[in-house]
Structure formats: C-alpha cells, structure tokens
Amino acid sequence: MHYRYLSLAALLAIALPGTRTEAQHPQSREGFWFNIGLGVGSLGCSDCGGEREIGPTGGLALGGTLSNQWLLGAFSNGWSKTEDGVTITAGTLVVGARLYPSPSSGFFIVGGVGIGRIDVDLGEFGSAGETGTGALLGLGWDIRLASTVSLTPFWNGVAIKVSDGDANFGQLGIGITIH
C-alpha cells in the first residue's frame, strides 16, 4: 500500500509546474554532478510467465556537465525482491546522458547503454546469475531546493538482455541531485 503513496507523490512532483523555490534558485548546471534515489519498481522477465514482481529499487549516478543542457555520466540502477527465501536481483551499469530540453527548466530525459546482470539466490540450494547488456531510458524533474541541490522525482525503464533471456523493470521514485 505504501508503494502507491510513493508512486502518487512522485507523479505529482513530476507533473506540477515549477515551484517558488525554483524561482529563487534558477536551473544552472556546471561541473561535477551526483544523484542518488530510491523508489519502487516492477520487474518482468522472459521466464516469469507474464507475471510482474513489485520490489524496491535504487539508483546512483555521477558525472560531468558538458553544458547547461547536457550531463554525461555513469548510471547504476537496481531492483531486488526476497520472498520465501528466494532473492531475485537485476541491475545495470550504463554510460549515458541527461538532456534538459529547456536549459531553464528542471525537466530532463536520461538514457544510456552498458552492462546488465540478473541474479537468483535460492538460499541453501545455490544461486545463479548472468551478465549481458543493459539499457536505461527515463525522465525526471529537478526541483531546486538550493543553488546546487535538487529534489528529483523520476521514472526509469531499465532493460537487460542475457543469453538465457531478458528482464526489464520500471522505477518510480525520488532522489537528490547535487549539481
């Protein structure tokens, strides 16, 4: 139930227009940037029989600023769930970019490609995992709290392709970005 409230809060924060705080702290981006976020996600896979699993997600990103519209960096996104002694995790590490279509707005689109990994831990029965390719596509909104700190609601779609199948998860959450 609490996932619904987090999802609603993140959607409202993305959908609402600029805040008074943003007017006091205009969108300027330069130098090193860093983002960390948490949320909820839904995982589907080629071997899941069409069922999607809900679990916690997280992300970490860092990089450098090319211009007030382009940020380059490394993005790590993960999903996990433990149920009945079985833990499933999926994650990516990609090189990508954040594009702010309007330099004066906090809205951005993010994308990248790199590696992805899927792991299943069956407790005392062992574990298995495989590494393949990973991709990230998402969007978010930097809501300025101070001149270099933003509250960042986001949605990301993450895809992983390995030789034995594939997985994907969506992330809806909120993070902190330091510019």
Image: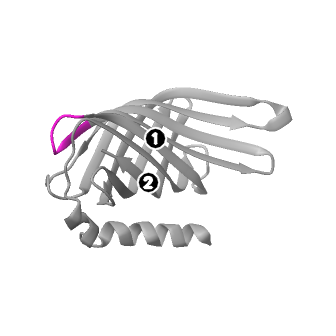
Q: Is residue 91 magenta?
A: no
Amino acid identity at mark 1: Leu
Task: Specify few, some or many for label 2: CA neighbours under 10 Å numbering under 14, 14-19, or 20 or more.
Answer: many
- Identify the residue at horizontal 37%, vertical 56% (top origin): 152
Quarter of image, res 29? top left
Report the residue marked by disc 2.
175
The span from disc 1 to disc 2 (Cα, nearest Å) is 9 Å
Task: Specify few, some or many for label 1: CA neighbours under 10 Å numbering under 14, 14-19, or 20 or more.
Answer: some
Report the residue marked by disc 1.
60
Question: Magenta span covers which residues?
Answer: 65-71
- Identify the residue at horizontal 54%, vertical 26% (top origin): 131
User: Could you tell me residue 172's position as x and y percent?
Assistant: 46, 58
Seen in the picture, residue 20 relative to 76 is either above or below; the reply is below
Which quarter of the rendering shows the C terminus? Answer: top left
Seen in the picture, residue 24 relative to 149 is either above or below; the reply is below
The tag earlier along the polypeptide, 1 or 2, is 1
- Identify the residue at horizontal 15%, vertical 39% (top origin): 67
Name the secondary structure under disc 2. strand
Name the secondary structure under disc 1. strand
User: Could you tell me residue 43's position as x and y percent?
Assistant: 55, 51
- Front residue of this view, candidates 95 and 142: 142
Amino acid identity at mark 2: Gly
Q: Is residue 135 left or right of residue 44?
A: left
